[in-house]
Amino acid sequence: MKHKVQVAVANFADVARIGPLVGVSIDAINATVISAPAPVLVIEGQHRRRAAETKLVLASAAAASAGTGPLVGLDWEPWFTPHNFNWNGGTMTSEAIPSVGRYTSIDILPMLQHLAWIEAASIDFLFVDWSNNLWGKTAWAQRNPNVQEIVNATQLTMGVYASERARRLAAGDSAGAASVPKFAFLLGFDNGPNTTQAAIYEELDFIRDAMMLNDSVGIDSFVVAPQSDAPGAPMLPLAVIFDGSGRDHSTWSHPDFALRFMASQLQGRPTLGTKEQYWSWMDGAPAPVIARRPDGSAEAATATSAYFAGAGWIGAGAAGHAGGATLVVTVLSIWADTGNQGPVCSEGSPGCDHSVATGPSPANLSFVLVNQWNEFAGQANGQGYGPNHDLYVDSYSAELTNDMEPTDLAACAYRRPNTTCGGYGYR
């Protein structure tokens, strides 16, 4: 499958502002083409402040033809259900309104449109956010009704994707079937009130029984990873467990899953990634921390379309969409930090030859996560965290959000001080 990144930016000044933070010069961005088995994210951009579209293309035809390069996962939330989310009032703090409208996670037509967009972006798998499912619970059977809605929406989506994969196979379109994204799960050990190791194992057992062994979903719907770092380790469905404490999980294992562990904001504790092999949900810096195996090779990294640091979205260290520049810079940083710093050019400019790839592949990099598709929620005005109630996380505004699902350029959502109606676009 061809792997490339095609991101719209408002103008090169946005990249010039962010690029130097990770040593990416504006001259390099203007003049050359990145060449690496790069993660593919094709988002035809329409930034609401942009007068004319400018594209950056990060590409590697050689890697594409060889079928090499990391698998690209997209953080995805199926929580748009009656007991979890309300678009139209009450708990609604969405920074924008999706282009497909105020959907629920069981609406088939928006689901199919999402599939079309995500597949066009060459995303290999959806990284399903179940990190809040077991807050304060000691057993999977104790899950609340709102959690069951998320479970149902996930099963439905996986079934729709599996059905589309089977339809293409039956039509003789094996390449098309292979391009339908698969799934991996993010579970939460301490993303909120702690749960127990036993409850996490029960949740994994449920995923196995209800999805892997269910003919309407099946094992082919799961992306796989080595169960361990040992040579010849079996390839099993990937499950990532969020534990912000960074504790040692070397004794954790499950016979049916390849377990990895994740925290967030690793820029302040990078050895969690570089020495302890923790993946990151989001880093509050332009240079994401690389999760490395015990031998030092790169396993995973997270690129993000925007990020906040310890002070939240309106505090120091945050970076908004910047018309796509933030995503470009975090991807470039991952490539630079994993053995391949390639050139970049403006699509259509003289000498921009995407068929030429140079430079080494990222050394053993297996996964690139892209943060994130859809959350559309944050703290209400004056209700942020911290003593002054001004520490806002999740999403804040159309600019200060890591959501990437296409949004309406004019529709009014939750209004923040000094903001106007309309989303960040993309079409």
Image: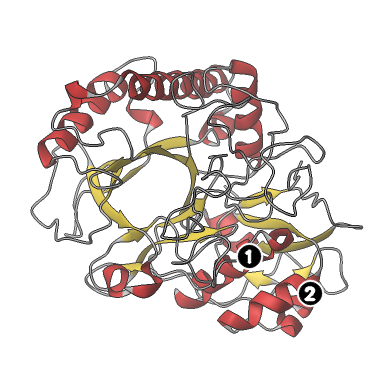
**Sequence-first disc among 2 and 1:** 2
Q: At label 2, which amino acid type do we have?
A: Ala
Q: Residue at x 23, y 21 (%)?
A: 209
Identify the mark at residue 289; answer none if there is no mark. Answer: none
Give the spatial CA distance, label 2 vs label 1. 12 Å
| Left or right placement of residue 192 versus residue 95 in this view | left
Q: Residue at x 58, y 32 (%)?
A: 92
Image quadrant assignment for residue 212: top left
Camera sees residue 343: no
User: Residue pushed farthest left?
Assistant: 251
The quarter of the image holding the C terminus is top right
Q: Is residue 179 above or below residue 48?
A: above
Q: Residue at x 61, y 61 (%)?
A: 327
Residue 235: x %, y % from top left: 26, 45
Residue 1: x %, y % from top left: 57, 47
| Left or right placement of residue 136 versus residue 40 in this view | left
Crowd band around label 1 with a 10 angstrom C-alpha radius: few (<14), some (14–19), many (20+): many
Residue that carries the numbered disc 1 in the rendered image: 326
Camera sees residue 329: yes
Display colour scheme: secondary structure
User: Residue pushed farthest right?
Assistant: 51
Image quadrant assignment for residue 17: bottom right
Local SS, label 1: helix
Residue 89: x %, y % from top left: 60, 26
Q: At label 1, which amino acid type do we have?
A: Thr
Q: Is residue 264 above or below residue 21?
A: above
Residue 41: x %, y % from top left: 62, 51
Crowd band around label 2 with a 10 angstrom C-alpha radius: few (<14), some (14–19), many (20+): few
Residue that carries the numbered disc 2 in the rendered image: 13
